[in-house]
Amino acid sequence: MVPFLLLAAAAAAPSAPAATAPAPRSETIVVTGTRLADTEKALRECIARHCPPNEDIRASLAHAENLFVAGRYRDARDVTKASIGRNNRYRKDYPVDVSDLYRGNARIAEHLGEAADFQLSTALMKGIIGSAFGKDDPRAIKADVEVGDMFAKLGQFNQARTTYDATEKRARAAGLPAIADIARVRSAWTYAMDGAIPVARKALEKIAADPAPEARIGRLSSLVLLARLDRNEGKTGRASAALFAELRTIHAKRPVLLFSPRLDIGGDAPEGDNAETTVNEPKTPTTRMMAGNAYFEKHWVDVGFWVTPDGKVGEPEILRGEGTRDWTKPLLRSIAGRLYTPSEDPDGSYRVERYTLTSRFMTDLSGTHQRTRSPNVRVEFLDLTADPAAAAPPSGTGGGAAAPVPAR
């Protein structure tokens, strides 16, 4: 299985520690996975015997993932960077493996606020795939969607739209309508991310109006986002009814996030994997303290919660974490207020999500040119659930079979 560090690109279940849900009447949460000491030993032995590059990369990603889950983000990044140093020269011989390595490194860098490394690693991942298989190969086109996601996360919405639009054209020309629809929906949603809600709504409504069977992914995703816009505006419009009708035709077993209350940790702070959790001018003692470089290295929580069969969230709880917890109270309130689509599972579903409090690095322009943290506080997201929710999860760009899109 694909490690969840790679779920930005692959709709696959994670291979590292993931929570499995018992029946609702039980209070036990079972966590399975390989021990950190075992993945460390496996990697060390692999390197010692000069194992093939693809084995080295798999062992590196497995250990980096375990370190990430343990909250040791810097150590995880050290592992992926060291593996890149050993294996980058094999990019032509093992393009998929080396591109996966860059993808995993980008994911970790994102949670550390290392925007430059996030951008570079994503670009290199895409370049390796394109060089190996050609720009019209499905893998290369999917990689281009990831590049668009990267630009959207960095707030470069015009560049994101340009990338998505070009990707849509190539996907349609290559006979890949599902990927084309994913790119089209994400392009439309960048307008909402940029505050142009009427433009986003118009674009999404056009996609949702396409009745063609091959347009189902785009139609479903656009209806999810239109329903979310309605909820954000306090409305229950036609989009919600159309969405539920569409979901009934596909007998969806997994919950799809329709609405999440705004997350406010002291400023303008939406939730999600690409959250622009921004505090332009720190207004409280807590957010002033957050501006320091060292503060953002060890503040994360894993949140577990049930999604009931009727789409509501049971009381979320922090399963584990590190660092201060003062920012988690509004996070838990936001999760508790979510609305998902009803599911056919009478027991509902249990989810585990990682949230990291961070801030991106920036260059001090006062003359020292030293790296410093931006005062804009962010909450990064990663789904640790063994079976990621379909359609548009709170991650915004995480896995899912029904065209997840950047959410804000």
Image (tube, grey):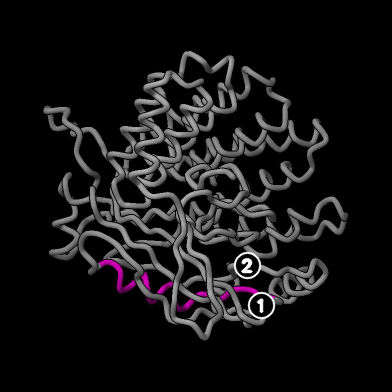
Kindly identify the residue that appears in the image at 26 percent across and 56 percent down.
Answer: 299
Across and down, in percent, residue 94 comes to: 58, 20
* Residue at image mark 1: 342
Report how many numbered discs are placed on residues in the image.
Answer: 2
In the displayed orientation, state which residue is furthest to the bottom: 25
Badge 2, how many Cα within 10 Å: few under 14, some, many 20+? Answer: many
Q: Is residue 72 visible?
A: yes
Residue stretch rendered in magenta on the structure: 327-343
Answer left or right for 376 relative to 289. right
**In the picture, which quadrant includes the N terminus?**
top right
Q: CA distance from mark 2 to mark 1?
A: 8 Å
Query: SS class of the residue under badge 2?
Result: loop
* Residue at image mark 2: 256
Across and down, in percent, residue 257 comes to: 58, 68
* Magenta-drawn stretch contains 224: no
* Magenta-drawn stretch contains 340: yes
Answer left or right for 379 relative to 190. left
Kindly identify the residue that appears in the image at 37 percent across and 22 percent down.
Answer: 48
Name the N-terminal-most of marks 2 and 1. 2
- Residue type for callout 1: Pro
Across and down, in percent, residue 218 comes to: 73, 53
| Position of 389 relative to 73 (above/below) | below
Query: SS class of the residue under badge 1?
Result: loop
Residue closest to the eye, 355 or 304: 304
Badge 1, how many Cα within 10 Å: few under 14, some, many 20+? Answer: many
Kindly identify the residue that appears in the image at 80 percent across and 66 percent down.
Answer: 250
| Position of 241 relative to 166 (above/below) | below
